[in-house]
Image: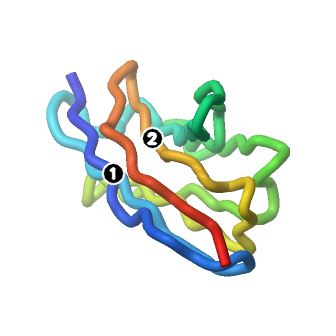
Amino acid sequence: QVQLVESGGGLVQPGGSLTLSCSASGSNGIAYGMSWYRQAPGKTRDFVARRNPHDSTTYADTVTGRFTIFRENAKNKATLQMNSLKPEDTAVYYCCSNGSWGQGTQVTVSS
């Protein structure tokens, strides 16, 4: 089973950028591909982005053009680069791989 740990969350002003990282350890690391989800208070956990094992990517409509998901196989790490952040991007962000989830990292976009 894969163990995942997110980092990089924080407080940022609207229009700013943040980079989230997800480090994987355990069985096959992130060889299965990596996804990011987010959950705002009182709302469901929603899909954000995915990078597949063969490096194709999928993004939610709400983040397309602003977020980019990278995978660093040698470091067993996946990164979510978030630009042009909006208050509605505020949420706890989770990474997911092969059915395993990280503990989440808080992103707050506010002036």
Q: Position of residue 3 (x, y in %)?
A: 21, 34
Q: In this view, does 80 lie to the left or right of 110?
A: left
Q: Is residue 51 left or right of residue 16?
A: left
SS at circle 2: strand
Vertical side of 110 occupied by 101: above or below: above
Q: Which three-letter amino acid code belongs to the residue tagged 2?
A: Tyr
Q: Which color mode does the image show?
A: rainbow
Vertical side of 4 occupied by 97: above or below: above
Q: Quadrant of residue 110?
A: bottom right
Q: Residues within 10 Å of mark 2 (few under 14, many from 20)?
A: many
Q: Residue at x 76, y 41 (%)?
A: 60
Tally of numbered discs: 2
User: Of label 2 and label 1, which has the lower sequence position?
Assistant: 1
Q: Position of residue 53 (x, y in %)?
A: 49, 37
Q: Which three-letter amino acid code belongs to the residue tagged 1?
A: Glu
Q: Which residue is drawn at 33% across and 24% down?
A: 100
Whole-number angstrom distance, CA of label 2 to CA of label 1: 7 Å
**Nearer-the-camera pick, 52 or 99:** 99
Q: Where is residue 46 in the image (x, y as percent from the top left)?
A: 65, 31
Tag of residue 41 = none
In what quadrant of the picture does the C terminus appear? bottom right
Q: Which residue is drawn at 64% across and 61% down?
A: 68
- Find disc 1 in the rendering and name its residue: 6
- Find disc 2 in the rendering and name its residue: 94
Q: Are marks 2 and 1 in contact (CB under 8 Å)?
A: yes
**Nearer-the-camera pick, 74 or 104:** 104
Q: In this view, does 78 lie to the left or right of 67?
A: left
